[in-house]
Amino acid sequence: MKLIFTRGTFREKLFSSMLFTTLTTLMLCSSLLLIVFSSRMEDSARQEADTLISVVSSSISDLRDSTEKIGSKLNRNSLVINAMSGGGAFPQQTYYELYNATSGLRDYVQFYLYDTNGALQYSTSSAGHSRTLPTNWGILLAAASHHGELVFRGADAFSYPDRDAVLYAARSIVNNAGDAVGYFVANLSEDNLQELLEGKFGSRNTLYITDAFMRTIYCSRPAETDSPVPALRSAMLSNTHVSSDEYNYYMRHEPTSGLYIILRQPKAFTRDTTRLLRTVASFLVLGSIALCVFVSFNLSRQLSDPIGKITSAMAEVEKGSLDTRVNLHRSDELGQLADNFDNMVERLKTYMDKLIQGQRDLDEAQIRMMQAQLNPHFLCNTLDTMKWIGKMNGVPEISNISMDLADILRACISTDEFVLLGDELELLNRYVRIQRIRFPGRFTYAARGHEKYIDCIVPKLILQPLVENAILHGLADRDNGSIVLSVSEQPGGLLRIAVSDDGSGIPDEVIRRFAQDGPAREGRLGLYNVNLILKKYYGTDFGLHLRNNPEGGATVCALLPITRRETDA
């Protein structure tokens, strides 16, 4: 299968891939559609059958509940109990009580009262019926065994001589002492059961009702000779399933009455229907195959030809020909791709021209930079000369200023972006020494807490602007100020470098504008530059923080991560 999609030209692979994908999808969709359609039809039929069985079950349950209520009502009737106990001096009143209690069901059910010997005493039926019932088997024995409970039995010719009755229900009638004095019996004929269940199980379906022993007591199509009940009984005993090509069988057991309700439903898809659907699907698949071959061939050609032209144009561009153009003159995606390719080549040509010009400008800038580097070296050499002249002429101030200024200048032109905190503090000491010569006796300077952090790496030249701000702005109006630089570690591995003075403080406008990252103003450009450097290197959470001290003066604090110099093990 892999060789089909890896060998041959792009057009052949595209054609075979499209054809294979289309046909596979078509076959899968057709099969899934048939399976899903069949499954939905079967589910719909199953739901319909469950609903119909529920309706039939509800009717039988209602009949049982009503019969149970009648039996309970008669069992509580003292006149009936007295009559069944042998004191029936008023039979007309007993008939009246029986007819009154059974008024709601006499159209469907016949009701009887038998004594403890099985002899009929009272009845709501005027038709011929059995005058006696056996007490040692059948319905009366079941009623006696289930003292005070309503029991159901299917009729048979041996136990129940009434030919038209198909279902019996009975319960014992007991007196106040709890002794049985008779039996309440109800039977239902096949015609009555047909009338009760008419239209509740579907015209296409067949309904079977059996007793607890799976003996058929009712069939909605009595003319049928092929009953599924024996097969269903055998399947239930062997815990198997009854299968049929034409019917589905659904069965529900009524635990209160012991009856089984069986619904036989014609299958939605018979063997002939399935064969017809498969034949139609086969013709549809054959027609779709022919259409897929035609469409795949033409579509693959329409895709492969423009791609071939674009590939050839790319090969020309790869060789260096930036004047190559595709020009497909199409409005679809391939046309847009060709136009984008042409535009890309045009921009590439423009960029190449700009790149060449930029390289020329860069060469010229490098030459100017190398020329400009001569001036700082010349200044350093000149400062060294001034240092030695000052020493030889006994002017130490000139020698110290020249030496310190030369070191500061070398640090400025150095290409290193980061230095050790110890080196930065040493460079700051040189700057302070120059300022002390410039402003003799006007300020004192001290560094504290830096001994443990001299091997930390910091951006170069970030301390000198902080001290310079304190000298030029904080102590501008003081004759004897003090400047203190303190270094400490903050939670989270942060390094805090603070420069404090006891001068006039920082204007609130400057602090507010600085906190909002406002533009640099004349006079404090060094602080803005240091803040920008810290944020660029470490992120916006770091930088400088300005505040005025409660006791006077101001503090400028730099916050940055602690990074120590790596040493060889």
Image: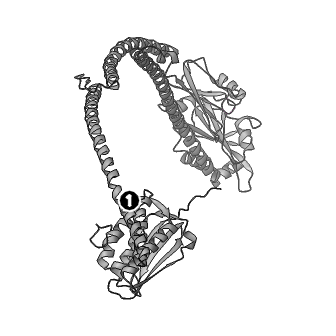
**Quick one: 268 or 437, which is closer to the camera?**
437
From the viewer's perspective, tell me whether residue 384 is left or right of residue 186: left
Closer to the camera, 195 or 133? Answer: 195
Residue 498: x percent and y percent? 45, 75
Q: If the image is split into quadrants, where does the C terminus sit?
A: bottom right
Dot 1 crowding, Cα within 10 Å, few <14, some 14–19, many 20+: some
Under mark 1, the amino acid is His
Q: Nearer the viewer, residue 569 or 298?
A: 569
Q: Residue 208, relative to residue 378: is it above or below?
A: above
Name the residue furthest right. Answer: 136
Q: Quadrant of residue 389?
A: bottom left
In the image, residue 259 lies at what x, y percent? 63, 35
On screen, residue 156 above or below 409:
above
- Whether 212 is among the magenta residues is yes
Horizontally, is 172 left or right of 196 in the view? right
Which span of residues is magenta-colored?
210-214
Q: Which residue is mark 1?
A: 377
Residue 206 magenta-highlighted: no
